[in-house]
Image (cartoon, helix red, strand yellow):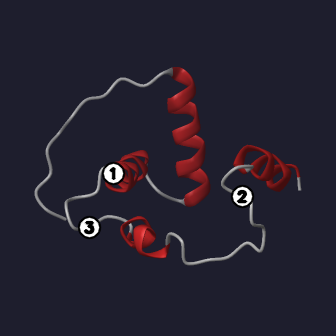
């Protein structure tokens, strides 16, 4: 880890309670959870999640077998969500 800088943040009671619970469950500190969340939400340039950087290459590479998905996308999405 690079050098560290002390920073104070204010959390709601609910946020703090959820962090404490999750930290205890994972055997981690709240600080470690917060650092992990920051890295995931705001990755350094060039260190992002590869799934997102590779997503444009996958676009259009699959076939649903349904010819009107573009025109009926709302219905198709609703059907997929409802199962």
x, y percent for residue 19: 52, 40
Q: Residue at x 42, y 25 (%)?
A: 11
Quarter holding the C terminus?
bottom right
Q: Residue at x 77, y 74 (%)?
A: 65
- Of residues 1 and 47, which is closer to you in this image? 47
Q: Are circles 1 and 2 on residues that touch, CB within 8 Å?
A: no
x, y percent for residue 64: 73, 72
Q: Earlier in the sequence, mark 2 or mark 3?
A: 3
Closer to the camera: disc 2 or disc 3?
A: 2
Q: Please, what secondary structure does the residue beneath circle 3 have?
A: loop
According to the picture, the residue beneath numbered tag 3 turns out to be 47
28 horizontally vs 35: left or right: right
Q: Please, what secondary structure does the residue beneath circle 1 have?
A: helix
Q: CA–CA distance between discs 2 and 3? A: 34 Å
Q: What count of labels does the image hold?
A: 3
Q: Please, what secondary structure does the residue beneath circle 2 have?
A: loop
According to the picture, the residue beneath numbered tag 1 turns out to be 35
Q: Earlier in the sequence, mark 1 or mark 2?
A: 1
x, y percent for residue 24: 57, 51
According to the picture, the residue beneath numbered tag 2 turns out to be 69
């Amino acid at each position: 880890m690079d050098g560290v800088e002390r920073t104070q943040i204010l959390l709601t009671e609910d946020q703090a309670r959820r962090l404490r619970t999750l930290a205890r469950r994972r055997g981690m500190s709240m600080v470690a959870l917060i650092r992990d969340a920051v890295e995931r939400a705001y990755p350094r340039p060039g260190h992002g999640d590869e799934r997102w950087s590779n997503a444009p290459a996958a676009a259009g590479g699959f076939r649903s077998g349904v010819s009107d998905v573009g025109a009926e996308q709302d219905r198709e999405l609703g059907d997929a969500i409802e199962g």
